[in-house]
Each structure stands twice: as structure tokens, then as C-alpha cells.
């Protein structure tokens, strides 16, 4: 093998390692985003249960999608007389932007997963014949 061929192989190896590191980093970021959004969903369920204040609240909250939890918590915050105006305003403000944040999360997580699967050097990815 001559020096040119050796240099090409070394460059290919360097790029492959960099690509693999970037892939691993992207997977880690997507995992963190998914984990954080799952925690938000748990907290929304707990908020709804607290605002509903019923022995059936846990059952009702368990069957709702995240968007429905946001809508229900928003409605409950508006009518709950035990909450001060400052808390109500803060809660409504936070809930008001949450759907947009979760839409960005969905686009990020599901979009990157599709891209990573298509271009991954890992088994099942495009380069592996997937």
C-alpha cells in the first residue's frame, strides 16, 4: 500500500470515528429531550389530579393525552376558587406555551430518530443495508 492509499484509509477512519461520535451524541440528546418531556407529562397528570381533587382524578388523568391534560389543567385553573390570582396567572402562562414546546419536542425526537435510522452506520441503518 502506498502513502496515498494509506492517507485515504486514515482519513476515512477519522471521518468514520467522527461520524460515530456525532451519532452517539445525537442519540444522547434525543434521549434527554424524551426523558424531560416524559417528566413534564407526569407533572401535568399530578397537577390535574390536584386541581380535580376527586377520588377518581388519577383514573381520569391516566387516560388523557398530553394535549388533553394541558387543556384540562387550563380549564381547571380558570375555575378553581382556591387558587390565588398570582398562582392562576403563572399557571395559565406556563400552560399556554406548553403545547408549542411539546410540538417542537415531537418534531425533534421523531424527526431525528427517522434521520438517524436512515443514515446510521449502525446495524439497521442505510449503510448497513437497511
Image (cartoon, rainbow, N blue to C red):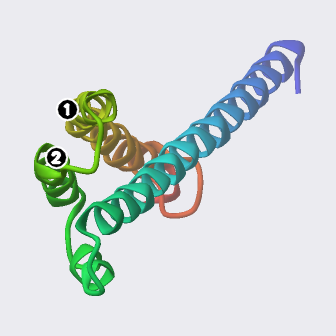
Give the percent coordinates (x, y) of residue 106: 29, 45
Assign the N terminus to one quadrant of the image: top right
> Disc 2 marks which residue?
74
Q: Which of 100 and 32 is in front in this view?
A: 100
Q: Report how many numbered discs are placed on residues in the image.
A: 2
Q: Crowdedness of circle 2 by 10 Å Cα count: few (<14), some, many (20+)?
A: many
Assign the C terminus to one quadrant of the image: bottom left
6 vs 113, left or right, is right
Give the percent coordinates (x, y) of residue 72: 14, 57
Secondary structure type for disc 1: helix
Q: Nearer the viewer, residue 85 or 17?
A: 85
Secondary structure type for disc 2: helix
Q: Nearer the viewer, mark 1 or mark 2?
A: 2
2 vs 113, left or right, is right
Q: Spatial distance from mark 1 to mark 2, Cα to Cα?
A: 8 Å
> Disc 1 marks which residue?
96
Give the percent coordinates (x, y) of residue 42: 43, 62
1, above or below 60, in the image: above
Q: Which of 30 and 55 is in front in this view?
A: 55
Residue ID at (29%, 44%) = 83
97, above or below 48, in the image: above
Amino acid at each position: 500500500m502506498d502513502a496515498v492509499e494509506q492517507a485515504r484509509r486514515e482519513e476515512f477512519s477519522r471521518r468514520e470515528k467522527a461520524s460515530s461520535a456525532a451519532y452517539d451524541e445525537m442519540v444522547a440528546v434525543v434521549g434527554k429531550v424524551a426523558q424531560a418531556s416524559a417528566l413534564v407529562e407526569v407533572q401535568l397528570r399530578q397537577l390535574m389530579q390536584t386541581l380535580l381533587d376527586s377520588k377518581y382524578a388519577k383514573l381520569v388523568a391516566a387516560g388523557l393525552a398530553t394535549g388533553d391534560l394541558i387543556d384540562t389543567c387550563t380549564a381547571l385553573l380558570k375555575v378553581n376558587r382556591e387558587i390565588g390570582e398570582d398562582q392562576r396567572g403563572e399557571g395559565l402562562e406556563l400552560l399556554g406555551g406548553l403545547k408549542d414546546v411539546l410540538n417542537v419536542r415531537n418534531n425533534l425526537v421523531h424527526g431525528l430518530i427517522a434521520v438517524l435510522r436512515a443514515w446510521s452506520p449502525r446495524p439497521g441503518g442505510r449503510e448497513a443495508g437497511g
